[in-house]
Amino acid sequence: MRALKSFALLRESWVGMAGAFIVAFWIVMAIFAPWIAPYDPLELMQPFAEPGAEWKGGGTFWLGTDSLGRDILSRIIWGSRTVLIYAPLATICAYTVGIVMGLLAGYRLGWWDMILSRIADIVLSFPVLVLYVIVIATIGASGINIVIAITFASAPGIMRIVRGLTLDLRNRDYVAAAQTRGESDWFIMLAEILPNARGPLIVDACLRLGYVVITIGILGFLGLGLPPPDPDWGGMVSESRSLAMAFPYMAVFPCIAISSLILGFNLLADGLREISLRD
Amino acid sequence: MTEALSPDVPLLECKDLSISYFTRAGEIPAVIDFNLTVHPGEAVGLVGESGCGKTTVAMAIVRYLGGNGRIVSGGITYRGRDLLSLGAEELRRLRGNEIATIYQEPMASLNPSMTIGRQLMEVPLYHDNASKRQARDKAIEILDAVHLPDPARIMAAYPHQISGGQQQRVIIAMALLANPQLLLLDEPTTALDVTVEAGIIELVAEIGEKFGTGMLYISHNLGLIRETCDRIVVMYSGEAVESGTIDQVFDEPRHPYTHGLFNCIALPTTDKNARPLVPIRGQLPLPHERPKGCNFGPRCDFFQAGRCDEGFIHMRETDVPGQTARCLRWNEIDWAEHEPERVQNIPTEVGEEVLRIDSLRKYYEVHDRSLSALISGKAVRHVKANEDLSFVAHEGETIAIVGESGCGKSTFAKVLMGLETATSGTLDFEGDDISKTEVGDRSAKQIGALQMVFQNPFDTLNPSQTIGSQIVRVLRRFGQADSKGEAQSMMLKLLDTVKLPRDFARRRPRQLSGGQKQRVGIARAFAGEPATVIADEPVSALDVSVAAAVTELLLDIQRRNNSTLLFISHDLSIVRYLADRVIVMYLGQIIEQGTTDEIFNPPYNPYTEALLSAVPVADTNVEKRRIILEGNVPSPLDPPAGCPFSTRCQHRLGEICGTIPPPRQETESGHSILCHIPLDELAKAEPVFSFKDTPQAAE
């Protein structure tokens, strides 16, 4: 019911609608990849085919092929699965950790706040990229490790937002009312404070999703993403890097895919913010 | 600016003014057919409940309506000049030089990064092209005129370094610097304590006399208007419903709404048992849901279908010259005959002792890490939030705890509720000492037996849960209901008790008005059938007509449950109305306690005396002795060594007050006063209130 109502509100913001449309487009791509993609993304067919070239085996390489002869369009479509599985998963993990830390620091204050905030400061003082390289280099490159690395690097930022919101909300009378009827700290944090902090958090989550998409792309580009030969947008850009001058399309199309998804998330966040400001 | 002011030409005139806001939902009329005249040197009060359009009128006069507000018809003239046809540059000059506005929040009107002096000097520098030296002299002179002590120090201070009352005085000084002809005051004292408010009111009255400034005084407080203004305009739902001189409107109101308002406020003649408040039924209509005909129709006892709901009703002259009312039936209603039916309540039996507080202390530690503090060995200082509190509460009794902000009444509530623990002393509740038991360590029965109603209706309910689920949670928590179904039906019964429709259970707090939310708050507090309920200013944020209904509801439920009610408030009118006994606090200490009669009659503690005199009374029958306090409440970090009130006391004896703690003097009946002055000396004080003729309802 509420989701429907939010969607109805979103329709009034064309920015948000555009974002929702782009994101929905990629979700459809990811879900129906086996039926939409014209070829197997791993099949070696005809190297260096230009976009629009015909294949002897029948059909067209709409976006060309890479140096090993794999169809770029199919790889982009299959690659959307990687991004759309790991980006939300990583964001959810980062939020879970960040929210728990932020609530504890902001509600209990004192030593909890002191220790958690200092941990966050230490993590945030590292350049993010260095942090990823260190974490992935230590635990190895795999899908789950991407999630761990992103959680490690973004949870402190989320914690600060949640802590700030909690500091404000903990002084509300309804929190005092819950305290005076002897509710546990966890009940107060999860039932009284967190639901009322959701507005800014949803907007931030959307922005962060976009950012995580970039991160996954970067990790792929640096060779810290999914191990080859799985299709991965960042990896595709990286593989075609040395050939980019001669065959620009090999890098350009995956780049467009990455940017469009990020744009989609950011527009959606803008739309949501607009709605949340309205009432 | 130099032209002579003729008293015949009104300073300000609003004629048939209509203002609308244009929103996504369409045009919303905010003010309809509004007329007002302010003559030079005259103070006109504009009274109404929230959303009635009084601030919109003020904004329209200075043409600050914002992007979506527009004057639809009618006109505003200032000394014969049409304000609506002025260009931007002329308007700017007018706003600075001739019309000055003072708002509610003093801190929001001052620039926190500039000294007071620089902000004040800007006015003569820019408006009169004065030299720096002249500007400085002028600023100091004006600070003196608003009775700020030590103007040179104030000039050098930043806004946060002076108190709220001083800030408001600075704002008034700033407004006066340009020598305005018209002052618009929009709830200028609402954010201030009563004793500070009294000082500001006196200042405003003095300004009117001294400078001949015309004033438009906007407030929701009828008492305040009575004490500051010459004439009054009462607004309801966008329309002026009645206007006239103060005496006319207060003594013989002609509009049923005005009548209703006076029945809603606690006056010295009201009494919770013999003469309770009569709330106006229903609610204020939303601006886009106003009824046809008379806006007050649906809530009016004299409504006549087919007449009052026919067409637009104009303001009409009454038989008294100068008094107008927007009512078709103003001369048909015989008010003497229609004395509203008042419920006769049976006083609650005061039963056995429920709560005994003995020498309760609550200190907060403040760590000072500065070098000088380390050297002097005063690294840890104590804020004495509660010092030596002792009193007893009985079953069915209503005890009011009165004091201004910072007196420690909220800290006491926290200790009582177990959100804080006492530093020393005992707090016996139903036989157990709970002074050092945090709420988490109290039994469910103890918690349920001691509940609280909170102050801010917009904060008291969790916005993301339904009303029903919040009450059910409390019922389950206190073990009142064993099953979900049982809790559900009990919750619906509670909604009946607080007179809310049952389908509110599924609503969320944002769909409720302030008064309705406060009713839910009351339902929640009484869910565990508490022995004692502590109410922290439960109606101070509500509109007059709503507050009366909520107050009556609270008293009604208290009577039914025979609970003890601890009523925290700064408003002595309401305290006089509902309390059996009163405790007056100042700077963490109980400075006087006794029955309500004892508190409101001599002997007074000097602070109580000043507090009583500061409360605005909306009754022309009551004469008040004026006592204006000097200075500010001292910091609780550094209270006076002797009597806490010695720094501001109007009866200060001398050295002894500041150095030796005063004795607690007690009469046989239990009336106790903390003061060096002997009781029989204090008893010689004249009563603060005196009545012109004896109120009929005293029997």
Image (cartoon, grey):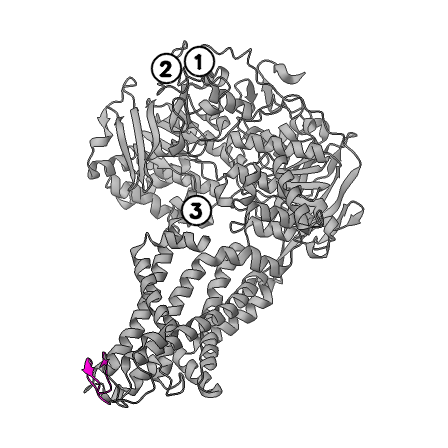
Confirm or deny contact between disc 1 and disc 3 (CB under 8 A): no
Does label 3 lie on the same chain as label 2?
Answer: yes
Q: Residue at x 41, y 63 (%)?
A: A204
Residue B9 visible to an observer of this rendering: yes
Confirm or deny contact between disc 2 and disc 3 (CB under 8 A): no
Residue type at mark 2 is Arg
Give x and y (percent) for residue B117.
Answer: 36, 46
What chain is tagged by disc 1? B
Identify the secondary structure beneath mark 2: strand
Identify the secondary structure beneath mark 3: helix
Choose between B512 and B40: the one closer to the eye: B512
Residue type at mark 3 is Arg
The part of the chain drawn in magenta is: A47-62
Dot 1 corresponds to which residue? B330
- Circle number at residue B479: none
Dot 3 corresponds to which residue? B153
Dot 2 corresponds to which residue? B316
Kindly report the distance in space between the C-alpha atoms of the residues bearing marks 1 and 3.
Answer: 56 Å
Does label 3 lie on the same chain as label 1?
Answer: yes
